[in-house]
Amino acid sequence: MARILAITNQKGGVGKTTTTVNLAAGLALAGRRVLLVDLDPQGNATMGSGIDKRALTATVYHVLLGEKAIDAVRVRSQAGNYDVIPANRELAGAEVELVDLERREVRLKEGLAALGDQYDFVLIDCPPALNLLTVNALVAAQAVMIPMQCEYYALEGLSDLVNTVKRVRANLNPELDIEGLLRTMYDPRNTLGQQVSEQLQQHFGDKVYRTVIPRNVRLAEAPSYGVPALSYDRQSKGALAYLALAGEILGKQAAN
């Protein structure tokens, strides 16, 4: 059965999409069957996987509204060697349209269930908001990965997200757990960053991944070429960090 991870943080610009795309590529490189679900109307994970969101006729929007089966919208990322359920601006309308639909929180879960055991990992790139799209991701997932920068405001937002996870677990998905906190865009020369990193480790212990994602220009450049950083420059510090993260996740899975 697939391990389904929702990669989420309501704060924008913390590396959610970069993490989703490069972790998908890293797990695929390790021989795992990976599906990336783009649940952000910006469609950045779709574009970063080498898929033109403007040319799409069917997306995750149609799956959520029950208009298409999930395997009818699936496309292949040749650059990353994984499959994608893509998104574009149409998805912004789903937020309003889902409100009046029955079972609106479980639409994504039901769609993914139709895929059976075709994948080892399903990674869901969430929008930077705690909205109905994010709730769909949290209901479909077994665990949450939280990418975050080591800065003061990140800690404040983290408590809101942890409370949301608790509410979803209590009311909609009793299996939901926090898989881990991922420190992104990390600069070891930044004193505040070091302090926040230490606080995270004190509060969350082994829920904080050992792997730290550094600030790296290659991670920023790769999306403009429509490829994961692992395809763009596999020896860059950023790509090597995501390979290490994939290894850490597989090691945890094997230990359990």
Image (cartoon, rainbow, N blue to C red):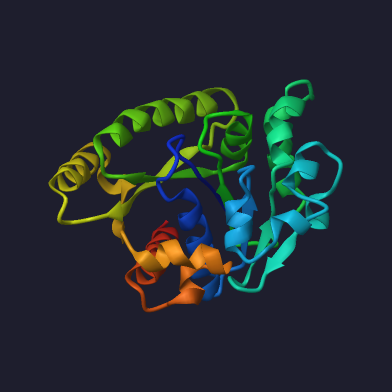
Q: In this view, does 237 lie above or below 249?
A: below
> Which part of the image, by quadrant, shows the C terminus?
bottom left
- Asked whether residue 63 appears in the rendered view, the answer is yes
Residue 101 placed where, x, y %?
A: 79, 24
Q: Residue at the spot x=57%, y=61% of the render?
A: 48
Would residue 208 appear left or right of 103 to someone viewing this image?
left
Q: In this view, does 131 lie above or below 57?
A: above
Would residue 7 appear left or right of 149 to someone viewing this image?
right
Residue 233 placed where, x, y %?
A: 43, 77
> Which part of the image, by quadrant, shows the N terminus?
bottom right
- Between 13 and 255, which is closer to the camera in this rendering? 13
Residue 20 placed where, x, y %?
A: 51, 55
Residue 52 placed where, x, y %?
A: 70, 61
- Between 218 and 81, which is closer to the camera in this rendering? 218
Would residue 133 appear left or right of 194 to someone viewing this image?
right
Q: Is residue 218 above or below residue 127?
A: below
Would residue 198 appear left or right of 37 to someone viewing this image?
left
- Between 33 and 220, which is closer to the camera in this rendering? 220
Q: Which residue is the extreme one toward the right?
A: 67
Q: Residue at the spot x=51%, y=37% of the render?
A: 128
Instruction: Kindly indicate the quadrant of the structure image that contains residue 132.
Output: top right
Q: Is residue 4 above or below residue 245?
A: above
- Between 71 and 46, which is closer to the camera in this rendering? 46
